[in-house]
Amino acid sequence: MILIPAVLILFWIVASMFLNNKISLSVLIYGKKNTDYIQVNTGKLLKGKTINGQFRAQDNYLGIVILRFNQFVKTDYDSEDVLLFKIREKGSKSWQFENTYKSGLLENNLLFPFGFPVFDQSRGKIYQFQIESLNGNNKNAVSIDKNNLTFLTGYKYPRSQILSSKKNTIEFFERKIITSFTSLDFFLSSFIYLLPLLFYVLVFLAYPILKKHKSTKNIFVAGLLLSILIDIVLLKEIYIGLWIFLIACWISCSIRYKLESKINFIIAFVLILIWVLLIQLNILDYQNKINIWVYTFMVIGLVMAVLDEKKSKK
Amino acid sequence: MTKFNKIINLVTIFLLLALPYYLFEGKLYVGGDDTRLLYSYPFEYLKNFVFFTWTNNSTIGVDQPNQFLVPFLSLWSLLDHILNNKVILSYFAFSLPLVSGFIYFKKFVRELFNLDSNYDIELYIGSLCFILSPIIIFDQLYIFLTTVWLLGVIPAIGYYYIRYIKNPRFEYIYVSMVICLFFSLALFSIPWILGFLLPLSAGAVVLLVLSKKKEIITVIKRSIFFSGFIILSQSFWLLGFLIPHFIHDKNSFASRISSQGFLDTFSPTVLATAKGYIIYPLLNLFHRQIAFDFVWKLKDEFVNLYDKTLFLDLIFPSVLLLGFISYKRFLNKENRKIYLFILTSLLVSLFLFTVNIGPLKNVFLSFGNIPGFVMFRNFYDKFAPGYIIIYSILVTISLVLIKKNYKHKYVWVNLAIFAVIILNFSAVKHTVNSPLWTTDNVYKTITIPQEYISFTKDIDKKISPTNSILSIPFTASLYSVIKDENSNRVYVGTSPLKLFSGVNDISGDMSFNFTSNTDIATQMILKRQYPKLNKFLYDHNINYVLVTKNIPTPVLSSYIFYPTAERNQDDQFLKAVSQGKKILTSSKGNYVIYAAKKRNTLLSSKNLIFKKISPVKYSLSIKKINGQQSLEFNDSFNPGWKLYLKSNSRSSFCGDIVYKNGNVTECRGDFVFFNLYDFAYSWMKPIFDSSHTQINKFSNKWIIDSEYIKKNWNKNYYTTNKDGSINIELVLYFRPQNYFYYGVIISTIVFLSATCYMIYLLKKNYE
């Protein structure tokens, strides 16, 4: 009874660490500490405006600063803004690294990693960085959500350091597990590897309960729709594992409570309506997620309709 | 059909015929990749391009069978002869796909769902939804390539196919064959046809699930029979089109689209353009984001109209939703199956037309590994016509279901959707007759100036078609710019020089297709590397330079030209690449031709006399061959070019001399379209084939060996001179041309048999 869930949990942890294509295995990601700050004096990052930040490195081998940008409408390539990223150790007179990035790169990567040559002995030292817009205007400028600031730092350990001794290896992986699974983004990204466990729980634990308590229909349907709404509104990234899990739950719910296929099309239509409304209000953050869920509901509705038709034939 | 319905149908057809007069105000709508000149100058097109498999239309030579245009151009030439008015003729070509789409779409949907005349209005609105869709405006009418004919051909063939599936009468196949024959130019748009058929194939899975085995087998059998006849009847172009795909002919259009360079463009193109959302196509609109990303003209239409009327467009998904709610109740079993089949096809089509649906984008990218799928890299274009046909079918049946379900309110829905369709179509003039991309007010509809026409006639008289001309200013594509007689309007499209004069020109980077030479000329112009450039021109048999002097300034700064390269084509450039001697000047001086610095000939060898018989055949006479010598054919390398030794060589090989350059003499050849003896080249053994190699990374070279001839051929094939050297006659022939002849034979047999069978059936029915 315990063995299968334990194996599935182990699979989740191992697969998340080794197969994660977002963060390399040798990179440790840390969140912002209280003493760190980012100074954003501007809404849109217009030409000449800057975002300034300062943080204390939490480990050695500092090599990445990650910031979350707001959704924006990408202009054509030639009109894109150019962002100049600079970083230095506090006290240093000049910037130790500078690089430029076309703003279009951020479009599909709003949680954007600014990489730079690794600072080997960085632990405990204070670093300052600056992002400056070189061509920003009202059409192409990017911005950072001051109220929902995501600021991470990454530390890229050399392979030789990780494997130098048994102790170092264990210590590294200990820190890797802690830093990874305490990050919501990592957790949600790893959801795809959690699916076997979740389906196991769904089939062997949740479904029998659902079967017994028919009155739970409204709660479950509403709960699931709420979860989808949360996915659309709160989670800006697309987490495939979570998407598949929610689809599986919705299909299970539809089968269990014999929901009509047209419900799916009605939900899809309501989402289209919301999408059009948000566009009119120039709220663009949720476009992509609504786009995905509209299609998802239509496909589910279609599959259910075909199955209904097949059944009715019999 | 009631009298009222007849009248509105006739009025609609009249309006569709009048549409180009409103859009283009009496000017020709020409330009673009296929020039659209074939609709106003069909005979010139027929004469210069379509019969031969080896073609060059402002490009280096390429194995590209264009014979699919033969039936249409023959028909259109006849119309040209009758109408004798280029504008009326080309406007009729603009309207005809819309008119036929309008007529046949109704018939198709009526047949698909067995609808009676009670639903004429819904069918009418559905067909308007199809042909007047903003997706059609932008994806088809604005570009107006030959794919536009699919708007009429797909519904027409769909209609006869459904009729045949229901009632297997041969006449449906026969009519389809005739339609496909005259509009085979539409069938050449294979990616767009597949863009329609792929979603339907996916949707057919639903039919397989819901149908009985016996029904499935019957449909499959009839489908094979129906499509088999159509495919066989199209052999005249299909054979030449398909074979290069199997034999991997170098330098053919097939090798171009399967080249690594082309394959590598799949992912970057998809990633750069898959930015749209499914909601816009569901609202019957083209993808908005791509228009903004690439600053298309469509962007203005969104800003000025579609963004403001987005709420009104909700009528389309509303209709689809109401249709779905009602389908179970109001459709019979058979129609429910078809409804679900169309709905499935729509969702698949929506995905393929959009791609950007979260994780499904990666699924589409992985399709890039399927051989041939690279043809869908411009998915937003290839799947657009298919999507809108399927979408409009669903809208139509949804309107029918609404009528059945809401007996008193359906009229309002019909009125509302009709109004939105018309409102959306109101953007047509701004979109189709819009300024040249990246210019503000240079329009693309023109009257071709008499000065240009006369000038090309002079070229025809003075320059042999075996030469190539360098057109400058050199463009980023293979375009030329011709300015209107009295305004700043321009023709911008594939250079029409060959169409009017019969002489090919090299007008831009893409004139070199996707070869490694694609941007070399531009680089040499940019870096002013004149000795290298002159050698390059010589190697490519470019012997003249055509300068166009009246290109409007905004066009020179447009996307057509590389700004620096354009600036570098100045007097210094002209002095460096030409002899400075004017060969021809147009009446007003806007077009001038100079001789290139160093002249070459299409064929070169020691003591060579040659003449052009046709674009695929040259006669050669080489005298005094003693040992080995090379023979160069300065057109693109292709293994399909073969040399054949002729017996009984003549003493009077040459009549009029066209040009003499040292050892090489070009004579005037008598054009022979087809000689029965050409068939023999299919099985005759070519000579010196093993020595056929590529030189200058471009052209053909053979090694001619007199000893080999003496040893292996009898004396009928050569004459011997006193010094022991020999004289021979050769034929240089492009062997893949014979695929066309074989195809014509197959198509003729199929058509003759089908016609005989039809006559027999008619006679039988009469008796």
Image (cartoon, coloured by chain):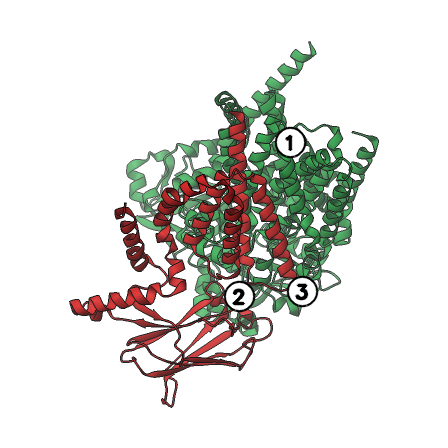
Chain colours: A red, B green
- How many labels, in total? 3
Q: The residue tagged with tag 3: helix, strand or loop?
A: loop
Q: Dot 3 corresponds to which residue?
A: B590
Q: Are marks 2 and 1 on the same chain?
A: no
Nearest to viewer (mark 2 / mark 1):
1
Q: Residue at x 39, y 32 (%)?
A: B683
Q: Please identify the residue farthest to the top as the structure is shown.
A: B767
Residue count near mark 3 (Cα–Cα under 10 Å), binned few <14, some 14–19, many ≥20: some
**Of B70 and B174, the residue lying toward us:** B174
Q: The residue tagged with tag 1: helix, strand or loop?
A: helix
Label 2 vs label 3: CA separation? Answer: 52 Å
Which mark is drawn over residue B329?
1
Residue count near mark 1 (Cα–Cα under 10 Å), binned few <14, some 14–19, many ≥20: few
Q: Are marks 2 and 3 on the same chain?
A: no
Identified by mark 3, the residue type is Asn
Q: Residue at x 35, y 44 (%)?
A: B721
Give residue B473's quadrant in the image. Answer: bottom right
Left/right placement of residue A201 relative to residue B582 reads left
Q: Dot 2 corresponds to which residue?
A: A71
Label 1 vs label 3: CA separation? Answer: 70 Å
Subunit under mark 3: B
Q: Is there a contact, CB below 8 Å, between mark 2 and mark 3?
A: no
Give residue B389's quadrant in the image. Answer: top right
